[in-house]
Amino acid sequence: MKHVFLFVLFLPCLAMAQVQRIYDENVRTLTVIVDDDPSLPPVLSLRKRHKLSIEWDEMSHDYQRYVYHLQHCNADWEPSGEIFESDYMSGLNNQLVEEYEKSFNTTQIYTHYRLQLPSQQIRPLLSGNYSLQIFHEDDDMSEDTPVLEAQFCLYENVASIRTQVSSNTDVDFNRNHQQVTLAVGYGTLNVVDPQRELKVVVFQNRRWDNRVTGLVPNIRNNAGIEFTHNRKLIFPAGSEFHRFEILDVQRTSMGVDRMEWFKPYYHASLYTEQPQRNYSFYEDQNGVCVIRSSDDVDDATTAEYVVVHFFLQTPRLPGGDVYVCGLWTGEAFNPDCKMEYDEVNKQYHAAVLLKQGYYSYQFRQEDGATARTEGDFYQTENEYSVMVYYRGQGARYDRLVGYSAVNTGE
């Protein structure tokens, strides 16, 4: 095989529909973890004692003086301009990131940074969307680009949400789609004009690119609203995510065809995939990644960085470029995860530098479709998340008053 050594220089690794971004080419592997469980989305109950950990690697052993800035956002992820910091948080912004540790016994050196919320310095007070930005201490936050941005949500359990998912859709029956039927109860909310005061957002598999907004209910009453037979709530069913795991750089494991060393990196070539013609079930994590190694001790600082080679065997596809996609790629179509077509071997290929661990992923075209790269099968296990925002008459910010997630495999 001809080896290609072009690979992505930095990637986030995350677990939610929000778009986590890295802007500094020396930073990699951004994770946003709730209660030490990387499979959970960063959506936390305002009334429970959750721990949110935001972690990343800077690819040197030089100490970086990072500070963090917390911003409340509206339902569209724009800064909430009508409230003050003292309204949405206790404490003061621009605190120093104090927890860090250098990598140990790795071929690529890096320093692992971590901060946790709530902390003694900062505690969010309101429900809604939050953006946490990391800057170098000497940056001008009004002008300079941050090092990275991590997003999370705090919700109130006020509105009730009832969700049903069916493969009997308004466009086909047990074929290529799944349709969501949704009911939102007001609970104790004083809703006068639901079309203006409520915003309902629906995601499939925590994907930001296929979120549905601007929904118009077809049933309204004094207790709530319902969305039935809504064409916007019909999703391509897709197929199960591919998986691989790199626990030991000296040997192969799940999904890995071979491990090789080409100075200065280990290289992992995954088994070549093909578009599926029939549905196949296997357990996956719908795009999640988990950083770990065979030692399972201090993975944050002992895990290696490996160049991972992805292959999709198929004739060149119409309909746009093909990308490797997962929650860990950050934005839905990260340009660093764009696949190049190999005319000789008739396959798409991408090489991505990733930290050891478990990864699930899909191949998607730039319009978000998986029909040509993966196939769409009504049996596919998918997760559908619903977020309900409320801004009553005269209110100054969007409250996140309801959150629910349902898995079609349960």
Image (cartoon, helix red, strand yellow):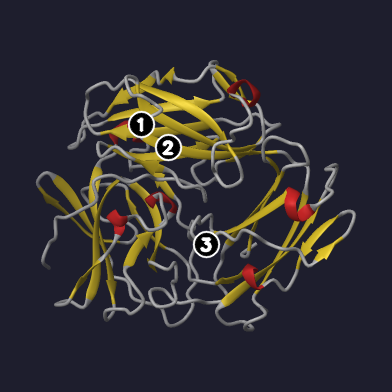
Give, as a three-letter code, the residue at label 2: Glu
Q: Quadrant of the C terminus?
A: bottom right
Q: Which mark is residue 298?
A: 1
Q: Quadrant of residue 162?
A: bottom right
Residue 268: percent from left, percent from top: 23, 55
- CB-based contact (under 8 Å), mark 3 and mark 2: no
- How far is disc 3 from disc 1 in space, using C-alphas? 36 Å
Q: Which mark is residue 210?
A: 3
Give, as a three-letter code, the residue at label 1: Asp
Q: Quadrant of the N terminus?
A: bottom left
Locate residue 310 relative to residue 95 in the image: left or right.
left
Residue 164 makes an appearance in the image:
yes
Q: Earlier in the sequence, mark 3 or mark 2?
A: 2
Residue 14: percent from left, percent from top: 44, 45
Mark 2 crowd level (few <14, some 14–19, many ≥20, 10 Å Cα): many
Q: Quadrant of residue 275?
A: bottom left
Q: Residue at x 21, y 78 (%)?
A: 346
Mark 1 crowd level (few <14, some 14–19, many ≥20, 10 Å Cα): few
Q: Earlier in the sequence, mark 2 or mark 1?
A: 2
Q: Residue at x 68, y 54 (%)?
A: 200
Give, as a three-letter code, the residue at label 3: Asn
Q: Residue furthest right?
A: 222
Residue 24: percent from left, percent from top: 29, 37
Label 1 secondary element: loop
- How far is disc 2 from disc 1 in space, using C-alphas? 25 Å
Q: Residue at x 37, y 27 (%)?
A: 135
Q: Which mark is residue 355?
A: none
Q: Which mark is residue 149?
A: 2
Locate residue 100 relative to residue 264 in the image: left or right.
right
Residue 120: percent from left, percent from top: 55, 16
Locate residue 329 relative to residue 17 in the image: left or right.
left
